[in-house]
Image (cartoon, rainbow, N blue to C red):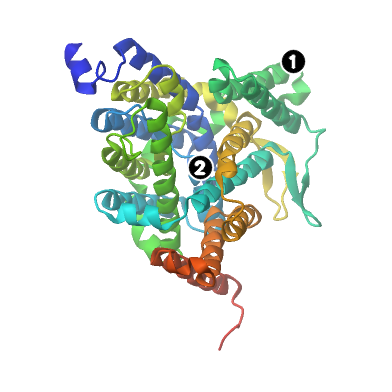
Amino acid sequence: MERIKKFFKIEERGSSIGLELLGGLVTFLAMVYILPVNAGMLSQTGMSFGGVFAATAIAAAFATILMGIIGKVPVALASGMGVNAFFTFTVVFGLGFTWQEALAAVLISGILFVIISLTGLREIVINAIPKSLKLAIGAGIGFFIAFIGLKNAGIVIADPATFVRLGNFAHPTVLLGLFGIILILVLFALNKKISRFAIIISILGTGILGGLLGLIFPGLTAFMPSFSGAAVGGVSDIGLLFGQAFGAIPSLLSNPMAYAVIFTFLFIDFFDTAGTLVAVGHEAGLLDNEGKLVGGNQALIVDAVGTVAGAILGTSTVTSYIESTTGIKSGARTGLASVTTGVLFLLALLIYPLFGIVGGIDSGYTDVFGAAIFYSPATAMALVFVGVLMVRPLKDIEWNDPIISASSFITIVMMILSFSISEGIAFGFISYAAMTAFSKKRKETSVVVYILGALFLINLIIYYNGIYSYPFWP
């Protein structure tokens, strides 16, 4: 026990082994929702639900335990929300990459993150981009994944005249999805300890209610979640995903769009991690005189290594979780809490069958291409709720600055309307660079911003000229 206390500096940070174990458990319960939600998101690309579930759990366990041992801070990691939506809806569905190529892009972005974390380039890039634009990107991702959640619940659907409209609220699956969203928001509004676990409680509560309704009313069985899990495969399917990223690297890099995809994966992970580590460090009282997290360099490296490991295992970008603050509020102050959370992620593989309820349910409708539309009432509310949490930093954007307000708005609105995180970021950078170039701010703006803006613009022109083949130039 004394060796453990000394290694993790438990007494030095005013904690105890009991508090660390409790904090690790609380953090796990606050973020275990990512296992079924991430599996449900990525499985839409053709990946095995069970395989992704296992890959997500093992990657989270590996990275979180490593964070505890090397970083010695109470920060847990797992596949990130938002970036998994980028993986599925932009990279695979929008740009036409295979899921293997998407994993290869995550792998390369992780390797680049490791390199950046070991050099001074990290500080240069962080300091070059205005804080408000970073906040706008995070908020835009929040709106984006909330929109996906509403779509997955069937609450908003496509419409040929207005593009989107409300769904069929007489459909039992849609009503179940609406119940889940209301439940999670009510739990959140209570603002009590139970609110920390609003997501996992709502996922299980909605799934159980749906399963009971299917048993009580046989006519609803086809529209309700099932606990059989027969349609989602098993955790042994991780073998179908493991190492696939390596084989897809050549075909990925042969596509000019790959470089923009890799950069966006890197960009999202880079700034999400930096912001999360500062927030968690502040909550735990682990910031130094310069406002940096104690052990922050090691934490960034661990985060990057986690992404590499996750891609090899078969999951999207692994990043630090703001839910770590729930464990800190319960007393966690050291890496022992992270080790505890990591071990619990490994044990979570044993409860995999419980999450058979999150599989997609055939709505009975088809899209414009004739493909069946599936609803996911047991996880849709998690996307909406995380979106709510992610848009809160909007209040810190400098709305009185015309350049900041315009570029922030464009970033957010284009992310939603283009249904693409990367294109929202691109339009945000292009607009910010263009406006600053013709303002008094041009001399104080880093050349990095102009380079990024130019690269994003060139990337958009090349990509869309290739898609539409418009003869704009000879």
The amino acid type of the residue labelled 2 equals: Leu
Observer-side mark, 1 or 2, equals 2
Kindly identify the residue that appears in the image at 46 percent across and 23 percent down.
Answer: 326
Assign the C terminus to one quadrant of the image.
bottom right
The image position of residue 342, as x and y in percent, is 35, 25
Residue 157: percent from the left, percent from the top? 74, 46
Where disc 2 sits, the SS reads helix
283 with respect to 138 (left or right): left
Q: Is any part of residue 255 visible from this angle?
A: no
Q: In the picture provided, is 41 more to the left or to the right than 55?
A: right
Task: Say which quadrant the N terminus sits in.
Answer: top left
What is the x, y in percent for residue 171?
A: 79, 33
Question: Badge 2, how many Cα within 10 Å: few under 14, some, many 20+?
Answer: many
* Secondary structure beneath label 1: helix
Q: Is residue 220 left or right of residue 104?
A: right
Task: Answer above or below: position of 219 versus 48.
Answer: above
Residue 290 image-quadrant placement: top left
Residue 211 in sight here: yes
Instruction: Report the residue marked by disc 2.
Output: 42
Q: Is residue 133 toward the left or the right of residue 308 in the image?
A: right
Are circles 1 and 2 on residues that touch, CB within 8 Å? no
Q: Amino acid at mark 1?
A: Ile
Q: State the residue at coordinates (74%, 39%).
A: 155
Q: Which mark is residue 443?
A: none
For mark 1, what is the residue? Answer: 216
